[in-house]
Image (cartoon, helix red, strand yellow):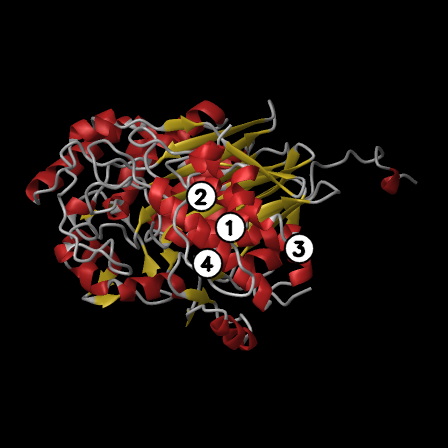
Amino acid sequence: MATTYKQEVIGSKGVVASNHPLASLAGIEMLTTGGNAVDAAIATMFALSVVEPMMVGITGAGFINYYNSRDKSSITIDNYCTAPIQATEDMFTPISDRWPDYMETKNHQNRYGYLSVGVPAALQAWSHIEEKYGLLGIEKVISPAIRFSKEGFKVSDYLSGIVENNKDILTSYPSSRTTFLRKGVALKSGDLLTNPDYAKTLEDIAKNGVSTLIEGKLGNSIDRDMKSHKGILSLDDLDQYKIEYREPVRGTYRGYEIVGVGPVSSGATHIIQALNIIEGFNVKEMQFGSVEYIHLIAETLKLVFADRFKYMGDPDFVKVPVEGLISKDYSQHCRQKIDLSRSSDFEHDNPAAFATESKNTTHITVADETGSVVSMTQTLNDAFGSRVTVPGTGVLLNNTMYNFDPHPGTANSIAPGKRVLSSMAPITVFKSGKPFMSLGTPGARRIFPAVLQGIINVIDHGMSLQEAVEAPRVWTQGQNLELEPDISPDVIEPLTKKGHVIERVERVAGGMNGVLFDDTGSIHGAACWRADGSPIAIGGGAATIRGSNPMFRV
């Protein structure tokens, strides 16, 4: 067994894995008071909007992958942001036609401030699935988040470092400055962070639900702030937004079934496409971290990203050839392009002929004792989103407009009402028809490649879940090949000789977490070192009446 930084948890009654211990505790509170996996997931997300405010919020967006053990169904929900009604294809001025500055625009208008804000989508989705699939109701599941907002929590090294990195831009927005800085100084590790304005907003949600965003106090506060700063998000946008139930994308890998969310999330589709390609190689024999293995992952990712840039977008605006992309025949065709002796450049192909995003995100995985699983990836996009906090509400606004291609005429160009393309990948893996593993991670375009490697780590390399989420990662989309620090330096020269341009990076993607069911029925929870991840498990059970248990008979 490899050395891991953190420890897994094992429970029989449920597991909540998130990127903050207080958020996981909120989920556990729901499970131990009669709630199910959905109640736990939504309580965890609301809590994360308090204790991990830079990553997730009620004006953000994401995707939900819910396996309901009662009827054995997989339900996948798209609650990603759309462009406002007043958005136009040429509303931003790109500064480059080449990577790495391809997505950047003049004055950073698509990244910071009021024009960077997409139509909020998180609160609508969280409220919807709690009402439809939960047992406890919104007032109950939101209560830990209200408590944390009022009473405060200690700032971690992780949060304080991200505040410091964003200090200058946060200072530009008065309400953000008030929340995250003290007399111009970024919050320090150990400081107590309270957000009384946000507590009041959460209390309003507990009482009035999503209507506070559509037609109530929160929505009107956002509308006033937008109009005061020449933003284009309006009350009409908030009223017209709809979450979408997407048909799950399904594939197989070495006898396991892979299930995730379809476009506008590209994650599951490209994970399945990549697994289909890799399935034709003896990965176990290559061994984890070897030159041959890293080269195979890199070449596969380049093939997949070539197709992503060409075909992926909002399926209501562009035709996305999902069936072709996940076809075993198409992957065999792609596999033949891989030369194991050298690095290659790849153009997109024609998957239709075979048919029959921000590093600063968060992910949670919840499993209850019935076998239901909720895997949710949610985001404000960048750290602290647009960096704008709406005065009087404690609410940060997203900057999901940054994920649109600012160049007109592409599959992911801006259009009114169009959904933003994402690489999010909340994935559930099934074995013999039952949930085996569920996992996900933050990390923008590095999300689905990281989750892909997590899956391979367990299935091919025989790692425990804890080892799999912590193992060093690699990434490329066709430019430099990024290697995390724990990848052996011995591979650099051989990979360079194959034609790869190596770049050492601190981390690839973010804090992956997940759950895994073992053959005994126990649930394992794991979270990695890249964030404040902390899984919590429930064991034990109900009391036994004295005399009914043979252990206590005399």
- The amino acid type, in three-letter code, at marker 4 is Asp
What x and y, as percent, mark residue 284? 67, 57
In this image, 167 relative to 445: left or right?
left
User: Do tag 1 and tag 2 residues touch (Cβ < 8 Å)?
Assistant: yes
> What kind of element bears circle 4?
loop
In this image, 552 relative to 94: left or right?
right
> What kind of element bears circle 2?
helix
Separation of residues labelled 1 and 2 (CA atoms): 9 Å
Q: Give the residue at mark 1.
A: 451
User: Do tag 3 and tag 1 residues touch (Cβ < 8 Å)?
Assistant: no
Quadrant where the N terminus lies? bottom right
**Nearer-N-terminus badge (4/3):** 3
Above or below, 123 against 388 in this view is: above
Residue pushed farthest right?
554
Quadrant where the C terminus lies? top right
What x and y, as percent, mark residue 258? 57, 39
- The amino acid type, in three-letter code, at marker 3 is Asn
**Nearer-N-terminus badge (3/2):** 2
Residue at image position (55%, 58%) is 296
Q: Quadrant of residue 164?
A: bottom left
Separation of residues labelled 3 and 2 (CA atoms): 24 Å
Q: Please rate how many residues cluster around mark 3, counting C-alpha atoms within 10 Å: few if below 14, some from 14 to 19, many from 20.
A: few
> What kind of element bears circle 1?
helix
What x and y, as percent, mark residue 451? 51, 50
Q: Give the residue at mark 3.
A: 282
- The amino acid type, in three-letter code, at marker 1 is Val
Give me the disc on residue 267. 2
Q: Give the residue at mark 4.
A: 532
